[in-house]
Amino acid sequence: MGKLGQIIKILNTVVTLAVLGLFIFTALIFKRPKIVENKEREKLVAASEKAATTEGKRILLPLEPITANLDPYSEKGKERTHYVQMGLTLELVDEKEKDNFDRLKPVILDKINSTLSKKKFDELNQVQGRYIFRSQIIDATNEILGGPIVLDIYFTDFLLQ
């Protein structure tokens, strides 16, 4: 029992030091970068400038209105649910990409809806949250399409309730 007791003490010390080290790293050393509107705008501008170098005429492609439930939250023991209804217009690099977009449209709409359902009301109720959401949609759509096809997304309607 003496050797087993020493092994348990050593193991307990190692686990305690690991947890303490993780706490120190997350609480004191690691600083989460702030998400600010200017950084998100710079990302959008950089993406549109990169795509602007390609040849072709840009097109605007309106989508049908989207209605989705937002991530519910509890307030004073009651679950609060919200929804968003929005209209989107996507700016594509050129007319040639419209067929590829139409072919993958169900996948893109599913990605938009799944991203929306993970958002909280407070996130989308702020301009900063909408810019983040916009950049997430652009990144996800371009990933599905296989390149910088979507230059920008415009909210034609945006209703939170």
Image (cartoon, rainbow, N blue to C red):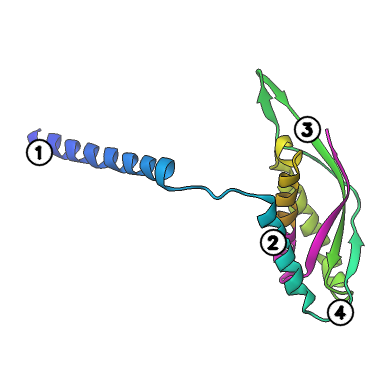
Query: How far across and down, in percent of the image, does residue 104 sit?
Result: 80, 64
Are dots 2 and 1 in contact, CB under 8 Å? no
Residue kind at label 3, given as amino acid type: His
Residue kind at label 2, given as amino acid type: Glu
Mark with earlier residue (2, 1): 1
Q: Which of the labelled discs sits on residue 82, or is there none?
A: 3
Q: Residue at x 8, y 34 (%)?
A: 2
Residue kind at label 1, given as amino acid type: Lys
Marker count (numbered):
4
- In three-dimensional space, the C-alpha distance between marks 1 and 3, rounded to whole angstroms, equals 59 Å
- In three-dimensional space, the C-alpha distance between marks 4 and 1, rounded to whole angstroms, equals 75 Å
Residue neighbourhood size for the residue with mark 4, other residues' Cα within 10 Å, grouped as few (<14), some (14–19), many (≥20): few
Q: Is residue 117 above or below residue 142?
A: above
- State which mark lies toward you, 3 or 2: 2
Residue picked out by circle 4: 56
Residue 22 shown in magenta? no
> Looking at this view, is 94 or 100 the one in front?
94
Q: Which of the labelled discs sits on residue 3, or is there none?
A: 1
- State which mark lies toward you, 2 or 4: 2
Mark with earlier residue (4, 3): 4
Mark with earlier residue (2, 4): 2
> Looking at this view, is 132 or 87 the one in front?
132
* Whether residue 156 can be seen here: yes
Q: Quick one: SS at disc 2?
A: helix
Are dots 4 and 3 in contact, CB under 8 Å? no
Residue kind at label 4, given as amino acid type: Gly
Q: Residue at x 70, y 32 (%)?
A: 72
Q: Quick one: SS at disc 4?
A: loop
> Looking at this view, is 101 or 61 the one in front?
61
